[in-house]
Amino acid sequence: MAALATPSTHIATTKPCISASWKLSKSSIANFGTEFGGASWTRLKSTSHILSTRPLFQCTTCTPLKFKRAVTKAMAQASEGNPLPGLPIDLRGKRAFIAGVADDNGYGWAIAKSLAAAGAEILVGTWVPALNIFETSLRRGKFDESRVLPDGSLMEITKVYPLDAVYDCPEDVPEDVKANKRYAGSANWTVKEVAESVKQDFGCIDILVHSLANGPEVIKPLLETSRNGYLAAISASSYSFISLLKYFVPLMNPGGASISLTYIASERIIPGYGGGMSSAKAALESDTRVLAFEAGRKHKIRVNTISAGPLRSRAAKAIGFIDMMIDYSLENAPLQKELSAEEVGNAAAFLVSPLASAITGAVVYVDNGLNAMGVGVDSPVFGDLDIPKTNKS
């Protein structure tokens, strides 16, 4: 994980390497000339250690200094037993419920790992039809490689709950869904029932994560989307966040935080991202601001959303052009690298931590800066401009 995700990590910087005509053979405090006379070096030595074998001003012939580029590295547990200085993300003693984890390669899983790395206890809500496969894979160790935390331990998921956030309470569930064999074997899986189960099992939570989205007609242009398809996208992808907060906020300790995941299609045209999904993301962002006010005033809970860049997850592959979106981002974003799920997870860990105690009602972009671009610089129109291009070799 990145440095911010765990209190067992600190930043170390390699020092520039200086090559000159003199060679450093032993340590002594440098003499800066006679104008310093008998002045005490005590204060200087308390903050600086300048090494030399002769007075600097006595050097008459020297070659130009050559500096190597300073490299910043993240070093985990460089000083064992010592607490991390500065501002670590510390979620020890916090309990998080993450709705929408069904495999180990999406943003929901990455957020769970970052929260766990920071010390939080993890509870998961998994879509009922995917529950059996997820729990079986978890039990058989298929996710063990993905569960490894920065300290070498494995992320522990305290409990997995069946959850279908499209339904608020049992009365909302149609008879044909109740008769579905995949649902019949799972009890208490509507939002209200899951919240009640969590309360019964653990009493309270501190963090609520909404990692849910579904549009049954996502591959259709908006003009060809049916009313049912459009409303289904809104229900599963945006109203589900309202529902989760409605039933989970009473369980949340004051000072808690909630986050969801959105996408730039909420405010920009993304051809191919159809079926009402762009509308659902716009609604999600608008609701985030209103919910931040209501949950903040009544319950002292913060509400934010992360606008994440494209990720090659199983869910994203359903859109059909995720690889093109990743290539486009790589070519046009200010930071020319592929976004990792870990980077979104780390941003989430920050947003739900005390370090972000004054941030609420915000859309936080974690997309290598693509949201800031007004044009696609990979267009042939910009071919004559001196713009750094991606090296694909």
Image: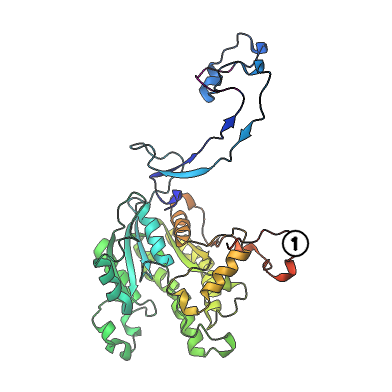
- Residue 270 vertical placement versus 41 (above, below): below
Residue 28 within the segment the image draws in magenta: yes
**Closer to the camera, 8 or 127?**
8
The answer to which image quadrant residue 274 occupies is: bottom right
- Disc 1 target residue: 385
- Residue 348 vertical placement versus 228 (above, below): above
Residue 207 seen by the camera: no
Magenta stretch: dominant secondary structure: loop
The magenta segment: 22-30
Q: Quadrant of the C terminus?
A: bottom right
Which amino acid lies under the numbered mark 1 shown in the image of this protein? Answer: Leu
At a point 51% along the width and 20% down the height, the residue shown is 25
- 31 to the left or right of 204: right
Residue 202 locus on image (x, y percent): 26, 61
Residue 280 within the segment the image draws in magenta: no
Q: Secondary structure at mark 1?
A: loop
Q: Residues within 10 Å of mark 1 (few under 14, many from 20)?
A: few
At a point 34% along the width and 85% down the height, the residue shown is 173
Residue 78 locus on image (x, y percent): 39, 39
At a point 53% along the width and 25% down the height, the residue shown is 47
Residue 389 locus on image (x, y percent): 65, 61
Residue 163 seen by the camera: yes
